[in-house]
Image (cartoon, rainbow, N blue to C red):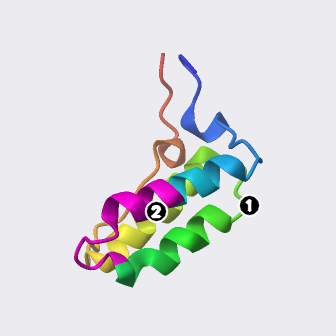
Amino acid sequence: MGLQKINDVTICPERNWRKKHVSSLKTSYANAPYFREHLDFVFEIFSERLEKLIDLNMSIIQYLKKHLMIDTPLILLSDLGVKGK
């Protein structure tokens, strides 16, 4: 990782880690209020064949923005044309 940009990080295509994450979330939050309302999203997001970590993160962020009724625009640094060191 180090100085690797988040939009360059690829997701391992194996499904095993996805199943483990879903299982961990179900175990940890099964009794939490509202968890059942969002369980379909959890299954959906981890069943998608996204290739980049940024795409997974953005899907989760957009979902949270929608359900928390946050209407602040999301701007990616890469869209601003700013050069870093």
| Residue at 45 percent of width and 54 percent of height | 24
Give the left or right position of residue 29, taking residue 18 as reference.
Answer: left
* Mark 2 to mark 1 CA distance (whole Å): 14 Å
Vertical placement of residue 36 versus 62, above or below: below
Give amino acid for label 1.
Arg
Vertical placement of residue 85 versus 34, above or below: above
Task: Identify the secondary structure beneath mark 2.
Answer: helix
Q: Main secondary structure of the magenta part?
A: helix
Picture disc at residue 61: none
Q: Position of residue 25 (x, y in %)?
A: 42, 59
Residue labelled with disc 1 = 49
Q: Which residues are magenta?
A: 23-35
| Residue at 52 percent of width and 60 percent of height | 22
Task: Identify the secondary structure beneath mark 1.
Answer: loop
Residue 84 is a magenta residue: no
Picture disc at residue 60: 2
Foreground residue among 5 and 22: 22
